[in-house]
Amino acid sequence: MRVLLIEDDPMIGASLQSRLGHAGMAVDWVTNGADALDALAADGYGLVLLDLGLPDRPGLGVLEALRRRKSRIPVLIVSARDEVGAQVAGLDLGADDYIVKPFEFDMLMARIRAVLRRQAGHAESKIVVGDITLDLASHEVAYRGLSQLLPAREFALLHALAERPGAILSRHQLEDRLYGWGAEVESNAIDVLIHYIRRKFDKDIVRNVRGAGWMIPKEPA
């Protein structure tokens, strides 16, 4: 999943970008509201993590501008402002959740999973598509009687396909979901990840559509 991190503190921003990256997310990091709104104009993100104390404009102003564009991208406010008024204002302007700094990283990940569940209409942290079950909390994948814990990048690829079952995602679309700005991506990176996934399960877990991309069928085989 591609995440936009809007955070002006260099230590917090670098730490979150690294830890979320290790969790399998492609994280683009900006440090001010103007750059955030420019990045969000592309509308390619699955989640926004928004600090409120930005140097050029209030984070709530960024949120308000995003919602005026009718964008439905989930927004999780991550702020040191712990007063009730700030939390109420953020939620009323369209934030999906609010977490106060400092926080435990595991709690942030749980909040992210909860926001994404609500966005997708799921009651629990599992996605079931055809023969595949993905556990978003543990990164465990079950397929036709086999169960494996997948590395973050392999899980992220399956997650991207499972979010749009039956749809063909191109190499560029998958790279865009799995890698952030400036990441060096080998030309065969997606092929290698799919090879590893198939080797753990079966070649049919991810279907290749020649010349177009890859997909996961909606229905069990």
Image: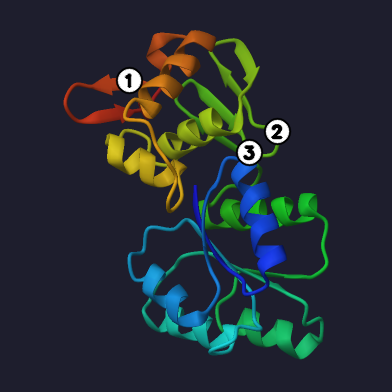
Per the model, the C-alpha gap separating discs 3 and 1 is 22 Å
Q: Position of residue 115 (x, y in %)?
A: 61, 58
Q: Residues within 10 Å of mark 3 (few under 14, many from 20)?
A: many
- Is residue 61 in view? yes
Q: Residues within 10 Å of mark 1 (few under 14, many from 20)?
A: some
Identify the amino acid type marked 2. Ser
Q: Position of residue 139 (x, y in %)?
A: 64, 31
Q: Position of residue 177 (x, y in %)?
A: 42, 45
- Is residue 167 in view? no
Identify the amino acid type marked 1. Arg
Front-most of residues 27 and 221 = 27
Q: Residue at x 31, y 30 (%)?
A: 187
The mark total stands at 3
Identify the amino acid type marked 3. Leu
Q: Residue at x 49, y 18 (%)?
A: 197
Q: Position of residue 169 (x, y in %)?
A: 30, 37
Q: Earlier in the sequence, mark 3 or mark 1?
A: 3
Per the model, the C-alpha gap separating discs 1 and 2 is 24 Å
Q: Which residue is mark 3?
A: 136
Q: Which residue is mark 2?
A: 138
Q: Residue at x 75, y 90 (%)?
A: 85
Q: Tell me the quarter of the picture where residue 219 sits.
A: top left
Secondary structure at badge 1 equals strand
Left or right: 74 as drawn, with respect to 34? right
Question: Mark 2 and 3 residues: CB-CB less than 8 Å, in contact?
Answer: no
Secondary structure at badge 2 equals loop
For residue 207, the mark is 1
Front-most of residues 138 and 38 = 38
Secondary structure at badge 3 equals loop
